Image: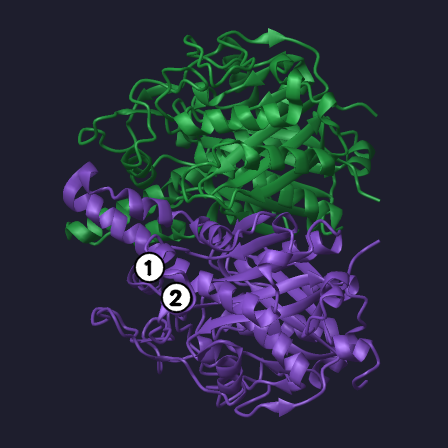
C-alpha cells in the first residue's frame, strides 16, 4: 500500500525574498534578483552580475549559540528549514524524531569555507589548517546542522549532483514517504554564491556572456541567450504522508505525485534530455499528459539546454505541448545547482494559488524554442498537475510531477 | 512486493590491491596499506603517513589526453568500474542501457586537481589550466562512469563523505525498487588530497603510526583512498542473463545522531538505531547476523560508540559475532570507504572467510568484542552487515546475505 505524499510547508531564502509571502509576491510580479555582484571584486572577469541574497539577520531563525559553528551556507539552509517548519505548523515536541528526516541537495555546499581553509593552509602551512573551518567544510555539514538544531533523527542524506542535487533529494524523500518509512521529510536544498565558485564558473566559460558575445543576463528560451548568471539561496519543502498531514489538520499546498529520472551520455559539460524523465514522472503519478497545465522549466539560458528541453517537451506532449504554460524562474533567481528547492516551492505556490509566475528577461523567443512560454506577466490558470524539470550538465535529468490536491478532492476546479 | 536485489559485479582500487582478487588476498593476509605520502609534499606535516594507492599506472588504463583531464579520483572510479562491469559480464551481455543507472558516493572528489589549480592561482605562479576545475563538482566521477559505458538510467551522487558510498548503495537499491532501473552501478571513489589530510589532522583524529581499530593504543585514522564499485541488479534480470551472483543486498538503514558536528553520540544510541533500521528493512532479526564489517576508524570515540551500539543491538551474543575493522589495512578511504567495505563484506559471505583487524595488540576494556584480531578466520557466514558513520552523526548500515535461490 503506497502512501500519498503532500507538501505542507515551504521555507524559502532567495534573492527575491525570504519567506514564502515576500518570495511569492516578487515571483509572480517578475522581480529579478540579478544585480551587480556585491561583496567581492569581479573586475578581472567578463561577467559582473549575480543574484545574491539580501542581508539576512540569521539570529531571527537560529539560536545564537548555534550560529557560531555554522558557515554562511549552513545558516542559509538552517534558516530555510526553520521557515519551512514554521510554515507547516509542525510542533517538533509532538512528533517522533525518528519518523522525521532530512534529504538535502547542494551542488557545491561550503565552497567558501573550503576556500578559506585552503588559503590559510597555503599561507601558514599545517598550523593554518583550522579545525572549525574543516568541520563545516564537508558537504553534509549542512544537514548535520539542521538535524542537530531541530533534533531530527530519521533519515539524513545529502546529494550533490550539479543541477539535479535538490531534485534527487526530493525524489528520494518522496520514495521513502510513499513506502511509509518516514512520516515527514524536510527536502530540498540550496547553494551559495561564493567568490571561488564565481571564479570556477568564469574560468570554465560557463557564465553569460559566454565567450564575450552579447549582453550579460539570463534570457531563457531567447534567441540571444548566452549563458547563465549565478544565483544562490535555499528552498525547503515539508513533505509528509497524506495520513499524517490530515491527522494534524495541515494546510496542503499540493501533492508530490511522481518522479522520473534518466541520464544522457553526451559529455561531461553537455546538457541533453530526451523527455523520458517527464514521461516516467507522469506515469508514476498516474497523470495523463493532457492534465499537465504547467511546466517549471530547467532552461538556464544556455544554447544547449533550452533547446534540448524544448525538444523533449515537444516529444512527450506532441501537439499538446503548446497547451502547457511553460515558465522559467532562473532569470529571477539566477542559476545554481541547488535551485530546485526554491523552484519546487514556487510550483507548490503556483498550484495552490492558480497562478503561474512569468519568465522574465526573454524578449525574442527562439523559433527553436517554440513553446507556450509565459512571458513578462504572471498568468492566472487553474493547474491540475505540473512538472518541475531539472537537467545537469554531464547528463542527469530529473522531473517531479506535482498534483493539485484540492482538485483531486473535487473541492476546486477541473 | 519488493524486488530482490543481488550483487553481480565488484571492482576495487585500494591501498592493498587494485583488483578484487588482489584486494581480497591482501585482506586475508592482513596486509597494511600504510605508507609515506607521495601525492602531495608531506614535509610540512608532523604525520607523514597515509594509505595510498600504488602500482596503478594511469597509462595502462587511459590515453594521454584522458590522464590530463581525469582527476585521481576519476581514474580510480573508472578503473574499478571497468572491473565491476566486466566481471558482471555486462560488457558482453545485451542489456537495455536506459535501464542501467549510476549512483556513486563522493568525499573530497577531484579536489586534488582543484587544489593544484588554486595553489598555482593563489601563488600567482602561472596561469593554471582551467580544465583542472572540471573536478570542482562531486558529480564528475559519476558522470564519467556513466559516459564510459553509455548508461542512461538514473544518475546521482551522494555526499555524506565518510558514509557516502554506503548511502549510495541504499539510493541505488531504491532506484531498482522504484522501477527506474534494473541494474545500478554504485559505491564510490575518492583520492587523497591536502584539504582532507590537513583537516583531519587539525582535528587531531589522525594516528601518527598506523590505524589500530579497537586497540587501546589507537589514536585515530590513517587517511586512505581508492574506489569500491558494486553492480546491483534485480534478481530476475540477473538470472535471465546467467550473471555471476556474489550475494544478495537485503536492505539498509540511514539515520542521524542529531548530536554533534564531529563526535558520535557517545552511548552508541545512533549506532544501535541505524543497525536496527537496516535489519528491519532487510527483514532480518539480530539473531541472524553472522559478521559485522565495522566502521572502526580507530578514533577514540568512534570505536567505543560503535562497540556500545553493537552491544545494544546484539546483547549477550555481541561477543560471538566476528567483527572486521579493515580500515586497519586500507585506511579510511572517506568517500569510497563504504564501497570498499561493502565489497569486503560481499566477499566475506561469498568466500566464507572473515578479514582481520590488524595492529590489534592491547585490548581496550571499553572495546571488548571479537574484532578478529590480526588473522583472518574461515567461517561459513550467511548474513553480514557493514557500518559507516560520518561527521555530524550521518549513520548508514548495509545488510547482505550469502546468495541462495
Residue B1 in the image, given as x and y percentages of width and height: 84, 44
**Residue A337's mark?**
none
Residue B357 in the image, given as x and y percentages of width and height: 49, 15
Crowding at label 1, few (<14), some or many (≥20) Cα neighbours within 10 Å?
A: some
Residue shown at 30% from the left, 46% from the top: A132
Q: Is residue A352 above or below residue A341?
A: below
- Where does label 1 land, which residue? A200
Residue shown at 61% from the left, 69% from the top: A89
Chain given the colour purple:
A
| Distance Cα–Cα, label 2 vs label 1 | 9 Å
Chain of the residue under label 2: A
Name the image quarter holding the C terminus of chain A. bottom right
- Where does label 2 land, which residue? A206
Q: Is residue B62 visible?
A: no
Residue mark closest to the camera, 2 vs 1: 1
* Front one among A255 and B83: A255
Q: What color does chain B have in the rendering?
A: green
Residue shown at 43% from the left, 52% from the top: B137
Q: Quadrant of residue B86?
A: top right
Q: Secondary structure at mark 1?
A: helix
In this rendering, position of residue B146 left or right of residue B283: left
Color style of the picture: by chain
Q: Secondary structure at mark 2?
A: loop
Amino acid at each position: 500500500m503506497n502512501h500519498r505524499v503532500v507538501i505542507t510547508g515551504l521555507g524559502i531564502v532567495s534573492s527575491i525574498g525570504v519567506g514564502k509571502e515576500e518570495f511569492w509576491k516578487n515571483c509572480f510580479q517578475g522581480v529579478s534578483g540579478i544585480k551587480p555582484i556585491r561583496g567581492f571584486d569581479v573586475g578581472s572577469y567578463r561577467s559582473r552580475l549575480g543574484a545574491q541574497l539580501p542581508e539576512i539577520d540569521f539570529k531571527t531563525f537560529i539560536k545564537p549559540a548555534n550560529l557560531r559553528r555554522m558557515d554562511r551556507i549552513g545558516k542559509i539552509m538552517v534558516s530555510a528549514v526553520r521557515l519551512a517548519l514554521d510554515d507547516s505548523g509542525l510542533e517538533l515536541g509532538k512528533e517522533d524524531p525518528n519518523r522525521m528526516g532530512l534529504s538535502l541537495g547542494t551542488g557545491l555546499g561550503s565552497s567558501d569555507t573550503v576556500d578559506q581553509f585552503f588559503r590559510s593552509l597555503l599561507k601558514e602551512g599545517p598550523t593554518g589548517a583550522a579545525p572549525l573551518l574543516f568541520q563545516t567544510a564537508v558537504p553534509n555539514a549542512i544537514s548535520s546542522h539542521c538535524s542537530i538544531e531541530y533534533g531530527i533523527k530519521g533519515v539524513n542524506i545529502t546529494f550533490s549532483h550539479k543541477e539535479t542535487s535538490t531534485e534527487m533529494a526530493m525524489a528520494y524523500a518522496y520514495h521513502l514517504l510513499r513506502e511509509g518509512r518516514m512520516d515527514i521529510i524536510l527536502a530540498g536544498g540550496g547553494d551559495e554564491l561564493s567568490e571561488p565558485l564565481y571564479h570556477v564558473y568564469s574560468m570554465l566559460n560557463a557564465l553569460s556572456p559566454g565567450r564575450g558575445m552579447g549582453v550579460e543576463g539570463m534570457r531563457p528560451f531567447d534567441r540571444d541567450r548566452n549563458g547563465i548568471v549565478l544565483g544562490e539561496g535555499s528552498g525547503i519543502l515539508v513533505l509528509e504522508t497524506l495520513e499524517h498531514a490530515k491527522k494534524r489538520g495541515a494546510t496542503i499546498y499540493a501533492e508530490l505525485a511522481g518522479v522520473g529520472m534518466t541520464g544522457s551520455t553526451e559529455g561531461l559539460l553537455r546538457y541533453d534530455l530526451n523527455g523520458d524523465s517527464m514521461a516516467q514522472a507522469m506515469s508514476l503519478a498516474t497523470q495523463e499528459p493532457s492534465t499537465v497545465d504547467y511546466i517549471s522549466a530547467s532552461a538556464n539560458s544556455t544554447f544547449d539546454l533550452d533547446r534540448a528541453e524544448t525538444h523533449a517537451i515537444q516529444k512527450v506532449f506532441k501537439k499538446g505541448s503548446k497547451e502547457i504554460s511553460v515558465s522559467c524562474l532562473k532569470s529571477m533567481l539566477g542559476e545554481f545547482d541547488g535551485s530546485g528547492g526554491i523552484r519546487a516551492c514556487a510550483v507548490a505556490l503556483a498550484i495552490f494559488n492558480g497562478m503561474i509566475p512569468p519568465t522574465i528577461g526573454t524578449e525574442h523567443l527562439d523559433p527553436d524554442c517554440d513553446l507556450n512560454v509565459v512571458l513578462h506577466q504572471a498568468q492566472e490558470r487553474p493547474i491540475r498537475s505540473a512538472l518541475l524539470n531539472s537537467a545537469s550538465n554531464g547528463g542527469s535529468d530529473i522531473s517531479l510531477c506535482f498534483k493539485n490536491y484540492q482538485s483531486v478532492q473535487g473541492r476546486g476546479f477541473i | 512486493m519488493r524486488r530482490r536485489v543481488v550483487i553481480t559485479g565488484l571492482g576495487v582500487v585500494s591501498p592493498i590491491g587494485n583488483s578484487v582478487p588482489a584486494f581480497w588476498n591482501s585482506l586475508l593476509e592482513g596486509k597494511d596499506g600504510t605508507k609515506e605520502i607521495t601525492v602531495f609534499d608531506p614535509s610540512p606535516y608532523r604525520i607523514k603517513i597515509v594509505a595510498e594507492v600504488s602500482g596503478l599506472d594511469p597509462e595502462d588504463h587511459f590515453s594521454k589526453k584522458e590522464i590530463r583531464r581525469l582527476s585521481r579520483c576519476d581514474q580510480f572510479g573508472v578503473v574499478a568500474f571497468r572491473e565491476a562491469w566486466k566481471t558482471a559480464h555486462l560488457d558482453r551481455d545485451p542489456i537495455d542501457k536506459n535501464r542501467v543507472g549510476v549512483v556513486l558516493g563522493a568525499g573530497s572528489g577531484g579536489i586534488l586537481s582543484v587544489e593544484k589549480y588554486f595553489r598555482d592561482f593563489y601563488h600567482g605562479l602561472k596561469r593554471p589550466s582551467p580544465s583542472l576545475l572540471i573536478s570542482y563538482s562531486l558529480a564528475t566521477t559519476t558522470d564519467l562512469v556513466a559516459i564510459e559505458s553509455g548508461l542512461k538510467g538514473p544518475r546521482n551522487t551522494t555526499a555524506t563523505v565518510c558514509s557516502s558510498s554506503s548511502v549510495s548503495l541504499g539510493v541505488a537499491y531504491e532506484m531498482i525498487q522504484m522501477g527506474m532501473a534494473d541494474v545500478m552501478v554504485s559505491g564510490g571513489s575518492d583520492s587523497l588530497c591536502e584539504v582532507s589530510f590537513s583537516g583531519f589532522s587539525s582535528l587531531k583524529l589522525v594516528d601518527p603510526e598506523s590505524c589500530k581499530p579497537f586497540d587501546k593504543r589507537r589514536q585515530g585514522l590513517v587517511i586512505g583512498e581508492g574506489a569500491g564499485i558494486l553492480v546491483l541488479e534485480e534478481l530476475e534480470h540477473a538470472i535471465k542473463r546467467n550473471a555471476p551472483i556474489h550475494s544478495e543486498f537485503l536492505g539498509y538503514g540511514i539515520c542521524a545522531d542529531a548530536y554533534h558536528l564531529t563526535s558520535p553520540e557517545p552511548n552508541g544510541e545512533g549506532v544501535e538505531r541505524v543497525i536496527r533500521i537496516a535489519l528491519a528493512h532487510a527483514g532480518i532479526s539480530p539473531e541472524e547476523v553472522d559478521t559485522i564489517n565495522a566502521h572502526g576508524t580507530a578514533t577514540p570515540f568512534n570505536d567505543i560508540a560503535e562497540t556500545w551500539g553493537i552491544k545494544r543491538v546484539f546483547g549477550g551474543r555481541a561477543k560471538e559475532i566476528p567483527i572486521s575493522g579493515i580500515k586497519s589495512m586500507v585506511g579510511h578511504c572517506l568517500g569510497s570507504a563504504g564501497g570498499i567495505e561493502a565489497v569486503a563484506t560481499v566477499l566475506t559471505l561469498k568466500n566464507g572467510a572473515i578479514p582481520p583487524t590488524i595492529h590489534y595488540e592491547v585490548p581496550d576494556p571499553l572495546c571488548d568484542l571479537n574484532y578478529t584480531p590480526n588473522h583472518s578466520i574461515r567461517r561459513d557466514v550467511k548474513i553480514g552487515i557493514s557500518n559507516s558513520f560520518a561527521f555530524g552523526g550521518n549513520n548508514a548500515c548495509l545488510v547482505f546475505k550469502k546468495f541462495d535461490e
